[in-house]
Each structure stands twice: as C-alpha cells, then as structure tokens.
Amino acid sequence: MTVKNIGIVINFNPKSWMGGLQYFKNVHQICKNSKYTLNIICNKKNYHQLKKEFIDVRFILTNIFDLNRSKQRIFSKLKILLLGKDNFLENFLIKKNIHYFMFSGYLGRNSKIINIPTIWDFQEIINPSNFSFKHKVLRNFNHFMCITNSSKVILSTKHDQNIFSGGDHKIKKKSYVMNMQDPLTDFKIISKRKILDKYKIKNKKYFILPNQYWKHKNHILALKALESLEISWKKKILIVSTGEPNDWRYQDHFRYIKRYILKKNLKKNYQILGLIDRNDLFNLIYHSIGLIQPSRSEGESGSVEMAKSFNKITLLSRIDVHKEQRPKRSYFYDVDDYKKLSNYLIHFYQEFNLIKEKKLINKSLDDNKKILNKLKKVFFKLLKMFKV
C-alpha cells in the first residue's frame, strides 16, 4: 500500500480555537489505518501544545506559514495570483513529500500539489455589520482565490455551498460539502458528581452553552431568557457557559456580557467557565439537560454536531445552517425570541428524566462507530477524485 501524505497547517493557538483543533483531531481519526497519513505543519511553539493532542502524527516544523509573517504572505498570494503558484512553498512541500495540502489555503492553479482549502463560513455576507470594509474585501479576495487557484474547496454545509456558488454551476462543481459530525472517539465518561465538583457547579440540573464569546454567537439572548423567568424559576435554572472569552472584532463584548449579568442579577443562573478541557466539555454536555445554541450565523456549528452525537435536546436559533444540521431532538426559536427560549428552559427542566435520558444517550454512543465510517467514506471520496 503506497502511503499518501496529507499536509495541514495549524498556525492558530490551539487553546483559542478548540473547535478547529477538534476538527483536525477528527481528520486524524479518519486517516488512521488507511493509506493516507496526516502531517501537521506548525512552528515550534504550537508543536509543544499539539504533540500532546496528536500522538502518532508526523510534525513538520517551520514558521513559513505563521500569521505574523504578513509581508511574506502578501508576496506569496501575489505570486499565486500572477504566476499560478508560489515556487518556494511548492518546493518546500514537495521536499517534505506532501501529496495533498488540505484545509490550509490555496497553492495555485499551476501547482503540482493537490490543494484543497476550506472556507469555514460566510459571515461577512450573513452578518456584514460585524466586519469592516477591509475585512470584507480580504474575505472576498480569499474566496476568489480559492475558486481560481485550488483543486477543490471544502465547505461544511449545503447552505454555504449555495452562497459560495451564487447559482453558478461551474463554481458549485469546484466545491465539496463535508459535514463533520463529531464521532466522540476520545470521549471518556467522568461521574456527574466529579465533573460538577471540579467546576463548582451547584445545580445538578443545568443547560450547557458551549460557544466562543463572539458577538454573533448571541449569548445575550440566553441572558434575556433567564432575565424573563419568574422568581421561582430563577432559583432553579442554570446555564453553564464554556468557550473563548474574547472577540477580536468587538473587544469590549465580553465585558458587556459580564456587566449585563451583574446588572440583571443573573450570577446564580449563568456560570462562565471559559476554555476547558475537551473531555470535560463532552462530560458537561453528556450530563446536561440539553444544549443551547442561539447564534445569529454559523458555518457549521461544532457544538450542534456534538449535541447530535450525544443525541441531546438542542435548543437552536432558527437559522438556515441549524435547520440543515437539525439534530433529532432539536427545538427552534427566532434569533431575538428570548421568551420562547425561556419557555423551553422551563419545559425541559420539568420534563427531564435522568433514566430515560441516559438510555437515549447511551444508545446514540453505541452508534458512533457509524459516524466515523460515514466520515471516512465522504473524506476518501474527495481524495480519490485526484490522481497522485
């Protein structure tokens, strides 16, 4: 069996984008025991963090893809735009025996290496007010370059594919939809008492909201839903929140959320944990009443895919991506309808039955091998489109 090497760049802080890290860990699981091997391209700083997450992966250490090398990155894009490839990057990857360059950008229409970038979302189109003119232009340029200077483009949902193609059949053919439901391969159950004690969660019944504190994630809706509860319910209902507490576009947003919690006296109803261990997050989802995802826009919501794998009650904002993802036990509300979300909180708090819940979840966990097999089928189908 001839081994084919897949190169991916991880040039972000793994602790700041847990969803991205888990995505690549899932790709690693897909490639195991196949003719495709994962090669992680990163700098030395990231290597020390990543080597704990990827035990049997080949690492290629370099700083040529670092985000702070802005001049070199601009020059590289110009070469690709004008010449159809960047010889320096291509030669580097050829020397490292990389056959597929994936999820990490385009190498050019004339590149010898199969290059398949990912466009994670189209928020500049769905939520344009969240982006400056400069960032809109840069994103549009990236989309143009992906269309004209790559072998194929990975998108997470059909909704994104429709935006990407704009009704153009040729552009649509350039894309490939790959939904990444989490197979939970590294999930290890921790007792409810132990996980609640670890994070000092006093309520045995709680909802989980795992989302970075970016403005479009719409945490404010969950807070308004809590605020609207009658006093008797405020004594019972708790939302546990996890995720990166910073929004690089709106740097005051997290402070605004904290001020709102204090002003509305919601500290006992809304507990912020910040970034936590991945298996701890899995366990908090596993032991929860259900998962809340109130976002105004998404590419593919990783938290919804986790809820799907656990077969949890999922309280979702009514946006196109969520309607496409649609877990079996999903319930929808409009992005500004905090009263409906509030009613759901009360209803599912009352209806929650631990024994029934565990039966539903455990049956779902038994089926998770099927998820991994499905992911393999979709992923390998993409790679087999190209002769290497």
Image: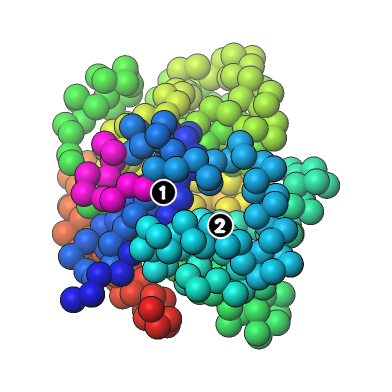
Magenta-colored span: 51-60
Q: Is residue 263 left or right of residue 33?
A: right
Name above or below for residue 279 compared with residue 256.
Answer: below
Q: Is residue 9 left or right of residue 217?
A: left
Q: Which mark is residue 88?
A: 2
> Which of 176 and 59 lies nearest the eye of the viewer?
59
Residue labelled with disc 1: 41
The image position of residue 359, as x and y in percent, is 17, 52
| Residue 80 can be seen in this image | yes
Name above or below for residue 317 compared with residue 14.
Answer: below
The image position of residue 257, as x and y in percent, is 62, 24
Based on the displayed image, in which of its 4 quarters is residue 15 positioned?
top left
Three-letter code for the amino acid on which mark 2 is drawn: Phe
Residue in the image at 18% along x and 65% along y = 33
Based on the displayed image, in which of its 4 quarters is residue 373 positioned?
bottom left
The image position of residue 362, as x and y in percent, is 18, 53
- For label 2, the SS is helix
Residue in the image at 36% along x and 29% along y = 276
Three-letter code for the amino acid on which mark 1 is drawn: Ile
- For label 1, the SS is strand
The image position of residue 37, as x and y in percent, is 28, 62
